[in-house]
Image (cartoon, rainbow, N blue to C red):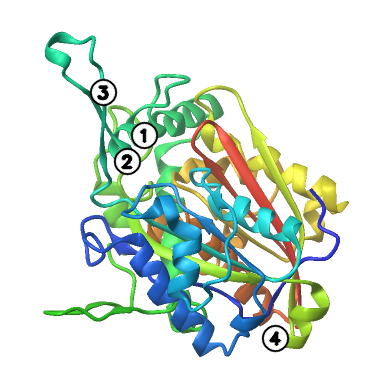
């Protein structure tokens, strides 16, 4: 989908730090985190909240009161007259939310928030079962473990693509080490787009000003880790970890974005794709190609690339299929390192893509990543500083 007139004011895309599984945010509602971080982001950037026409809320894990999520969050942000769609597309939620905002027009506040820690256990009534015992499912754990369409878990898709592509344990380890090094190199600039979490409480406050759960990986350490599955190429360093957090952006017209931010992050095109069953890590490639085709761009036109790569094989496959060098992707790190709260993951990588392009004086960028159901989503941006 090509966008005729959609942009983010330069600096108006942000993310919270991501908390590790069962970490600092494990007992805090994702809507509470979203309210606190979004309010601070708008205030710190002096963004004109009174000019916002609507709110797009992305989430994939139910939180208390999420049934009323978009209007409730708007009211908590001091924007009681606003509402808008709620979007849920697994790991593609951020791109889908930006896509919805770009097509809606006006000025849209996009917020994506999730807490994978302490996901809900659902109880489905089943009166015909023995004793009327209900059927239960764990929203997060069961979804990670099994795609109902294929019977395969997410990790299995990574190993299938690695085996079919001939990718090795050494290659996966090398990606894990490279991404760790890139993340460390990007730490001094994180203050540009990371918004700390600060939620006052009666007895104690919830505070988070840096990522949790990040474990630096060097070549020696990577080589000693056991595979996550028997004979697999992925270790726990070569795959992402579940996390909690939120992210956001202000989407408006190019003219209004320039007035607000000076520089402009033009949303150029989006792309969505689905690949063969149990081949999820392949999906970012056709998604990226769909976006490039909509924009009439070529891979050679890109100046920066970020990816959502829950498995190292995602980037190995993308590099092989597109010719984009591994070292040219994710120069500030990626979800393989800082974790994956699902809904906001893509927005964080898009914020890092924007900052990379800003450092380079502007240019064209691609974000692409996979999502549950063997799908992928991609977004093309053009930064004019």
Q: Which residue is mark 4?
A: 261
Q: Which residue is mark 3?
A: 125
Q: Horizontal placement of 29 versus 173: left or right? A: left
Give the CA separation, mark 4 to mark 2: 38 Å
Picture layout, residue 167 above or below residue 51: above
Residue 34: mark in rendering: none
Crowd around label 3: few <14 · some 14–19 · many ≥20 (10 Å): few
Q: Horizontal placement of 265 versus 338: left or right? A: right
Q: Which residue is mark 1?
A: 143
Crowd around label 1: few <14 · some 14–19 · many ≥20 (10 Å): some
Q: Which residue is mark 2?
A: 140
Residue visible at 53% across and 33% down?
A: 280
Give the CA separation, mark 1 to mark 4: 40 Å
Residue 334 visible, this angle: no
CB contact under 8 Å: marks 2 and 1:
yes
Residue 230 visible, this angle: yes
Q: Secondary structure at mark 2?
A: helix
Q: Which of label 1 and label 3 is nearer to you? A: 3
Crowd around label 2: few <14 · some 14–19 · many ≥20 (10 Å): some
CB contact under 8 Å: marks 4 and 2:
no
Q: Which of marks 2 and 3 precedes in the sequence?
A: 3
CB contact under 8 Å: marks 1 and 3:
no
Q: Secondary structure at mark 4?
A: helix
Give the CA separation, mark 3 to mark 2: 20 Å
């Amino acid at each position: 989908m090509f966008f005729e007139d959609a942009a983010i004011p330069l600096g108006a895309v942000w993310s919270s730090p991501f908390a590790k599984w069962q970490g600092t945010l494990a007992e805090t509602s994702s809507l509470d985190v979203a309210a606190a971080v979004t309010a601070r982001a708008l205030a710190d950037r002096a963004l004109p909240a009174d000019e916002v026409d609507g709110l797009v809320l992305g989430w994939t894990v139910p939180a208390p009161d999420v049934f009323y999520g978009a209007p409730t969050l708007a009211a908590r942000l001091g924007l009681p007259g606003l509402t808008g769609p709620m979007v849920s597309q697994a790991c593609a939620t951020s791109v889908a939310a930006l896509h919805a905002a770009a097509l809606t027009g006006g000025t849209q506040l996009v917020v994506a928030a999730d807490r994978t820690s302490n996901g809900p256990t659902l109880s489905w009534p089943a009166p015909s079962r023995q004793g009327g015992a209900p059927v239960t499912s764990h929203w997060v754990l069961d979804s990670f473990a099994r795609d109902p369409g294929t019977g395969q878990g997410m990790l299995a898709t990574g190993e299938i693509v690695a085996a079919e592509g001939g990718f090795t344990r050494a290659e996966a380890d090398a990606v894990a080490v490279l991404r760790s090094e890139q993340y460390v190199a990007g730490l001094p600039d994180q203050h540009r787009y990371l918004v700390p979490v600060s939620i006052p409480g009666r007895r104690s406050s919830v505070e988070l000003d840096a990522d949790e759960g990040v474990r630096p990986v060097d070549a020696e350490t990577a080589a000693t880790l056991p595979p996550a599955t028997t004979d697999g190429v992925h270790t726990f360093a070569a795959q992402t970890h579940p996390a909690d957090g939120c992210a956001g952006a202000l989407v408006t017209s190019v003219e209004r974005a320039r007035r607000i931010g000076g520089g402009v992050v033009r949303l150029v095109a989006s792309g969505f794709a689905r690949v063969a069953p149990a081949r999820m890590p392949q999906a970012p490639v056709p998604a990226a190609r769909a976006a490039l085709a909509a924009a009439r761009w070529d891979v050679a036109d890109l100046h920066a690339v970020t990816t959502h790569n829950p498995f190292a094989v995602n980037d190995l496959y993308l590099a092989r299929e597109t010719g984009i060098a591994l070292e040219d992707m994710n120069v500030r790190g990626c979800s393989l390192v800082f974790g994956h709260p699902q809904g906001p993951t893509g927005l964080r990588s898009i914020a890092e893509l924007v900052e990379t392009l800003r450092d380079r004086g502007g240019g064209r960028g691609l974000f692409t990543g996979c999502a549950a159901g063997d799908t992928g989503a991609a977004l093309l941006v053009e930064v004019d500083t």
